[in-house]
Image: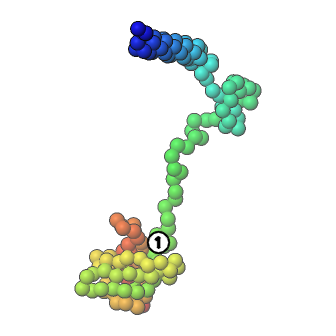
Amino acid sequence: MGRSQETFNKKEKEKRKLKKKKEKLQRKEDRKADSQKGKGLEDMLAYVDEDGNIISTPPDPGKKKKIKAEDIEVGVSKQKEPDPADLIRKGTVTFFNHSKGYGFIKDHETQESVFVHINGLTEQVDEGDKVSFEVEMGQKGPNAVRVKKLP
């Protein structure tokens, strides 16, 4: 009688297992050799030159600039307060629904429509009236407030 195929397959499987184990061990050794761990601080440092580019060599101390801490601004620069006269705009009431209490004013300068609520009126207005108003940002966009009829 001949030998069964199982013993041959078992030997082949064992050979493949050992080969995979050796390859895995070899990869592990390669990773250890190429590892970044254990390098000195100097190898990990990066420098910035006078143009803002990242370089691996330290910059020339002769090109160093002195900057006062007070000169550095962090955040948004402060804007001057707008003149109250510039905030007042002129426009025409294009639509106003008295029963619902809202309408729209077309700005003469920007030609955009601005929402107006009855609470923003100082006196009653009708469609076609020329008005002066101020714009404030509401939840859904610009709202006209302090609306006054022009003579």
| Residue 142 showing in the rendered view | yes
Hey, which residue is sitting farthest front in the picture? 1
Q: Nearer the viewer, residue 8 or 50?
A: 8
Q: Nearer the viewer, residue 128 or 68?
A: 128
Rendered residue at 62%/18% (across/down) = 42
- Residue 32 appears anywhere in the view: no
Which quarter shows the C terminus?
Answer: bottom left
**Residue visible at 47% across and 14% down in the picture:** 12
Query: Disc 1 marks which amino acid?
Result: Leu
Q: Residue at x 63, y 26 (%)?
A: 46
Q: Position of residue 63 (x, y in %)?
A: 74, 30
- The colour scheme of the drawn protein is rainbow
Foreground pick, 32 / 13: 13
Residue drawn at (40%, 12%) of the image? 4
Mark 1, residue position: 87
Is residue 119 placed above or below 83 in the rendered structure? below
Kindly indicate the quadrant of the structure image that contains residue 41. top right
Question: For the image shown, how many numbered marks are present on the structure?
Answer: 1
In the rendered image, which quarter contains the N terminus? Answer: top left
Residue 145 x %, y %: 36, 74
Q: Give how far across and how far down residue 60 sits, in percent.
A: 74, 26
Out of 18 and 40, give the one closest to the viewer: 18
Point out the residue furthest to the left here: 99
Q: Quadrant of residue 141?
A: bottom left
CA neighbours of label 1 inside 10 A, class few (<14), some (14 to 19), many (20+): few
Q: Is residue 118 above or below residue 16?
A: below
Identify the element where label 1 is drawn: helix
